[in-house]
């Protein structure tokens, strides 16, 4: 019997394209918003890990440290294998329609589609801020089960106006503010508002501050939301190695703060350099990356790659734009030099 596997697949999955994350060889990797600074893992940490036992399902020790660093109650934290996994869980639990502004982080759309939920995409305004009138209108009309707001927003780099975000929080069901890039922002974020709004949840991740390989994201919300999301969480979603390494390394938050400081000051220098480069229009950023407009962005992307400098081509997301992650001073200098050469 001849079987067509595709015909067996649920229609919403059949039409889905897998998230593209293939490795492109390069000398300077500035495409994925990772931190250029990693950490050494000592033998003691590795030796403390028991390979025959399942990990602590609640990652209690790690939770305590994060709660202490962010002055939260551990009860209000739930871990995911990266915040991607938590986006999956939240969408599973609260369902659609799922509303989010565009352009934004692609996983809100991909996961909604995978789960067969209706997607409501609302274009940002000319300043890359939220179009509140349109969003409030669509909230009334479509009654979304969940609203995702990435602030600072990937790929535009800006924070949305706090008053616009609050207007949305006050008018709908669950609002998830994805603060993956908050550590790089001059704004204080929405953690202080959590007690005031029961329908507010916040996503944070360790991925952007030096731990992308460990896959640790966390949801911060009221106990009721945490309990509901915990129902769909896979039992051992955070492995022992990640738990042990992050627990140990987070004991020294000063090094992480130092790295964040280096990244934000390099971001400003990079922004200045981009402004000075003819034919480039960079957008201000509160994150660890910069979006910039350039003529023939496709060509520029490939010319940079030929020089072994990898950035992200935003084709289909913000046409005519590239996104560069802030690297070390040396990496940024290589990028700027290469960019100036390929622009000639
Ligand atoms: C806005 C936003 N949220 C979440 C993530 C994913 O984070 P994690 O590595 O924790 O899955 C990213 C990654 O690029 C992102 O840009």
Image (cartoon, rainbow, N blue to C red):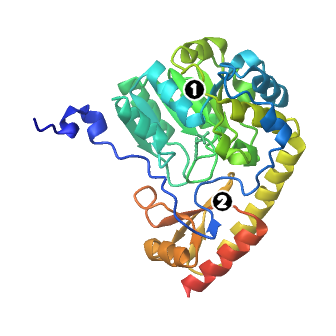
Horizontal relation, residue 54 to residue 19: left or right: right
Horizontal relation, residue 264 to residue 197: left or right: right
Of the 4 image quadrants, the one containing the N terminus is: top left
Task: Where is residue 246? Give x, y as percent.
Answer: 76, 36
What residue sits 61% from the left and 25% below the top? 201
Residue 195 seen by the camera:
no
Between 144 and 302, the residue placed more toward the observer is 302
Task: Where is residue 321? Give x, y as percent.
Answer: 50, 65
Q: Quadrant of ligand 1?
A: top right
Between 165 and 330, the residue placed more toward the observer is 330
Between 26 and 324, the residue placed more toward the observer is 26
What residue sits 72% from the left and 31% below the top? 243
Disc number for residue 115 = none
Of the 4 image quadrants, the one containing the C terminus is: bottom right
Q: Please tell me whether residue 229 is drawn above or below residue 105 in the rendered image.
A: above
Q: What residue would you read off at disc 1?
A: 169
Horizontal relation, residue 85 to residue 272: left or right: left
Label 2 C-beta lies within 8 Å of the nearest ligand 1 atom: no
Question: Which of disc 1 and disc 2 is earlier in sequence?
Answer: 1
Q: Please tell me whether residue 165 is drawn above or below residue 211 in the rendered image.
A: above
Between 297 and 53, the residue placed more toward the observer is 53
Q: Residue furthest front?
A: 52
Q: Quadrant of residue 176?
A: top right
Q: What residue would you read off at disc 2?
A: 284
Residue 324 seen by the camera:
yes
Distance from Cα at disc 2 to Cα at disc 1: 26 Å
Q: Residue furthest left?
A: 1
What residue sits 51% from the left and 25% below the top? 90
Question: How packed is label 2: few (under 14 Cα within 10 Å), some, or many (20 or more)?
Answer: some
């Amino acid at each position: 019997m001849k079987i067509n596997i595709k015909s067996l697949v649920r229609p919403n999955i059949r039409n889905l394209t897998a998230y593209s994350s293939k490795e492109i060889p390069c000398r300077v990797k500035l495409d994925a918003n990772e931190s250029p600074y990693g950490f050494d893992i000592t033998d003691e940490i590795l030796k403390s890990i028991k390979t025959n036992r399942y990990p602590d399902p609640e990652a209690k020790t790690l939770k305590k440290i994060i709660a202490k660093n962010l002055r939260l109650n551990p009860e209000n934290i739930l871990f995911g294998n990266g915040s991607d996994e938590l986006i999956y869980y939240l969408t599973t639990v609260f369902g659609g329609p799922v509303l989010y502004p565009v352009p934004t982080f692609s996983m809100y759309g991909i996961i909604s589609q995978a789960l067969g939920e209706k997607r409501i995409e609302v274009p940002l305004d000319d300043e890359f801020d939220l179009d509140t009138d349109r969003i409030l209108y669509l909230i009334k009309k479509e009654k979304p089960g969940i609203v995702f707001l990435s602030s600072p927003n990937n790929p535009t780099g800006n924070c949305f106006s706090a008053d616009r975000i609050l207007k949305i929080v006050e008018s709908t069901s669950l609002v998830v503010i994805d603060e993956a890039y908050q550590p790089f922002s001059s704004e204080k974020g929405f953690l202080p508002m959590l007690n005031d709004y029961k329908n507010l949840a916040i996503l944070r991740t360790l991925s952007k501050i030096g731990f992308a390989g460990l896959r640790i994201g966390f949801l911060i919300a009221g106990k009721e939301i945490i309990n509901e999301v915990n129902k769909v969480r896979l039992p051992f979603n955070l492995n022992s190695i990640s738990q042990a390494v992050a627990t140990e390394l987070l004991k020294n938050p000063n090094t992480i703060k130092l790295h964040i400081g280096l990244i934000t000051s390099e971001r400003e220098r990079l922004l200045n350099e981009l402004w000075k480069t003819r034919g480039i229009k960079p957008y201000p950023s509160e994150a660890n990356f910069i979006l910039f407009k350039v003529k023939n962005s496709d060509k520029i992307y490939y010319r940079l790659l030929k020089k072994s400098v990898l950035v992200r081509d935003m084709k289909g997301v913000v046409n005519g734009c590239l996104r560069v992650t802030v690297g070390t001073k040396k990496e940024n200098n290589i990028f700027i030099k290469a960019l100036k050469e390929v622009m000639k």
